[in-house]
Amino acid sequence: MSAPVAALLPLHTERLVLRQVRDSDVDAVLGYCGDADVTRYLPFGVLDREGVLARVQRWRDELDRDPADRPDDGWMLTLVVDLGGTAIGDVMLRLGGAEMRSVAEVGYVFAPSYGGRGLATEAARAMVDLAFTHLGCHRVQAQLDPRNLASARVCERLGMTHEAHLRQDWFSGGTWSDTSVFGLLRDEWSATQR
């Protein structure tokens, strides 16, 4: 890794700033994480204020850890996606522990009023670049409910390959659902960045 992750923040894209969460972001995060339509395909249910505060604290705790300091533990970076001073979503990059250190997972969640503008793709692209360029990852993957077509389109725009469809492997909310796995290798990413 070329620099501690916190030293690289915030990340800037053409339209967005990916930054650490602030106390003033809690209401915005509650706005989308408290929406049943938004969380329908996510690995957590609708969050109330207490749930959002706990989630935000986990983001802060993980940022305080450098992924290189504890190689046997997994590590996760979650950044708020800021558009013109407004928190419109968040993006996540998770590294595995020990032998899975070079494999990262990317995830994202956005307020629905900002959908359809390519903002999720732009934010996720910055996280994928961070994984390959600064964290030395070999592979980045995304796991999602196959019914989440908008999320699948983001993966496709990132150049990811649909690699697997796992049947009824996730139990949540009293029902089983499927998982789609998308993946991208560093060589593939490098080829698209030339």
Image (cartoon, helix red, strand yellow):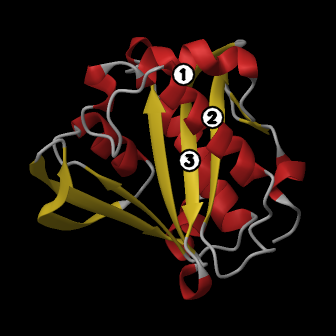
Chain-order first, disc 2 or disc 1: 1
Q: Which mark is residue 56?
A: 2
Return the residue nearer the eye: 165 or 31.
31
Do we see residue 194 in this rendering? no
Q: CA distance from mark 2 to mark 3?
A: 12 Å
Q: Which mark is residue 29?
A: 1
Return the residue nearer the eye: 187 or 95.
95
Please rate how many residues cluster around mark 1, counting C-alpha atoms within 10 Å: few if below 14, some from 14 to 19, many from 20. Answer: many
Q: Quadrant of the N terminus?
A: bottom right
Which amino acid type is shown beneath numbered disc 3?
A: Met
Does the CB distance between marks 2 and 1 fall below 8 Å?
yes
177 with respect to 52 (left or right): left
Does the CB distance between marks 1 and 3 fall below 8 Å?
no
Q: Which mark is residue 92?
A: 3
Does the CB distance between marks 2 and 3 fall below 8 Å?
no
Q: CA distance from mark 1 to mark 3?
A: 14 Å
At horizontal 22% and vertical 38% (from top left) the residue drawn is 149
Which amino acid type is shown beneath numbered disc 2?
A: Val
Which amino acid type is shown beneath numbered disc 1?
A: Val
At horizontal 81% and vertical 52% (from top left) the residue drawn is 64
